[in-house]
Image (spheres, rainbow, N blue to C red):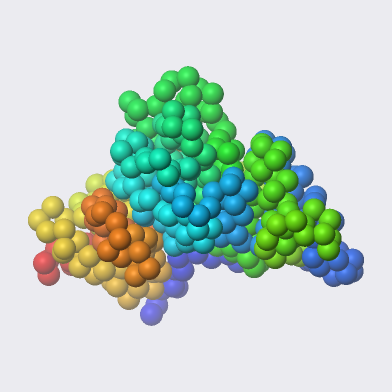
Amino acid sequence: MSQTNIPVLDLKPQYDSLKSEIQVAISRVLESGQFIMGPDVKLFEQEVAEYLGVRHAIAVNSGTDALVIGLKALGIGEGDEVITTPFSFFATAESISNVGAKPIFVDINPDSFNIDPTAIAARITPQTKAIMPVHLYGNPAAMAAIMDIAQTYNLKVIEDCAQSFGARYYGTCSACHHQCDDSTRIQIAGKHTGTIGNVGAYSFFPSKNLGAYGDGGLIVTNDDQVAEIARMLRVHGAKKKYHNEVLGYNSRLDTMQAAILRVKLPHIDSWNEGRRLVAKSYNQLLADVSGVVAPEFADGHVFHQYTIRITNSDRQDAQQLIARDSVHQYLAAQGIGTMVYYPVPQDQLLVYKGKYPVNPVSDLLASQVLSLPIWPELNYETIERVGETIRQALALEAKNA
């Protein structure tokens, strides 16, 4: 192939820009010999808490553990129900099930890809104890409406921010219009995702907007008691070593990863702005392409993924998958990497299949979504090539339909 392949994500430009700082941080940890819960962990917790504007930040070893420990710290357990979205990575529902609770899936808004707040109240039962919104692809969920519902029904809110580090909620998402209480919207406008509910859970998987060089996660809260429990749970349920009080976990962020994240944290806003500029270019290039629905450009969206929908009004729903997959395959043949997030909604995975009512929007979008290459340093020439190749793919797909 004559043209250079375009991956769906390229982390090398970021590393090249920070290489000397990263090496200094790694050497510092190696010289210290403190590889578990060393000084950089506490310093990172302080720095990230200040950045997010929260009282407590508790570093753990993965985003999944952040969800599990966050739920446990909120007292969610056996017999409880937690309302969440079917359109997310399995860790969202898995964490609920793993604390003994039951995930209750509420369908999504097709414009935001996030849980539809207008459908939440109908799924609340006496067993409902919490809502777990996911800020999918880096787009803030309709938090004003969700917080209003939580207050009305006395529910906890744990935000899944695996894809939204640095995102801020401004109440401008399409799912929010005409449903949010204005006073709630004003009160939380401008706050980081993860700092609005009772608990926020983040992932530092290497591909995230703020990524480590291995697994990592974070729990944030303004509740002193929740923070104390979370800190115990991450170290085998002990406040003091060898004095275990409850059953906990071995979930500590490696010192090496904390040191790397400290180098990266000051750059997150500029990187997120870079992603928004890439997304804006894509939106402009794809605006007149028939068969493509570009993602909404909501205020505060940090575009962990730039996800389009491949649609065709002449096709039945069952045929949408054919159109999306043909575009996906055509781009791959031209050296352009894309990903499908997510091909199977959580409620349709084997572990849950047949146990829940149908969520038609999630099912449809699972057959349409395609995530395009995106990283902060992606240049316009490459973006143009991706856009033009999508045009070619759709023209060919329409011809063969």
* Nearer to us in this view, 201 or 312: 201
* Nearer to us in this view, 131 or 179: 131
Residue 125: give x, y in percent of width and height.
37, 41
Q: Residue furthest bottom?
A: 1
Q: Residue at x 70, y 44 (%)?
A: 227
* Nearer to us in this view, 241 or 374: 241
**Image position of 149 with respect to 76: above or below:** above
Residue 350: give x, y in percent of width and height.
34, 70
The quadrant where residue 341 appears: bottom left
Q: Residue at x 38, y 80 (%)?
A: 1
Q: Residue furthest right?
A: 32
Taking 293 as reference, is 256 left or right?
right
Q: Residue at x 36, y 54 (%)?
A: 86
All told, the count of numbered labels is 0
Any part of residue 95 in sight: no
Residue 314: give x, y in percent of width and height.
10, 56
**Image position of 178 with respect to 400: above or below:** above
Q: Quadrant of the C terminus?
A: bottom left
Any part of residue 1 in sight: yes
Q: Residue at x 47, y 19 (%)?
A: 183
**Image position of 41 with respect to 48: above or below:** below
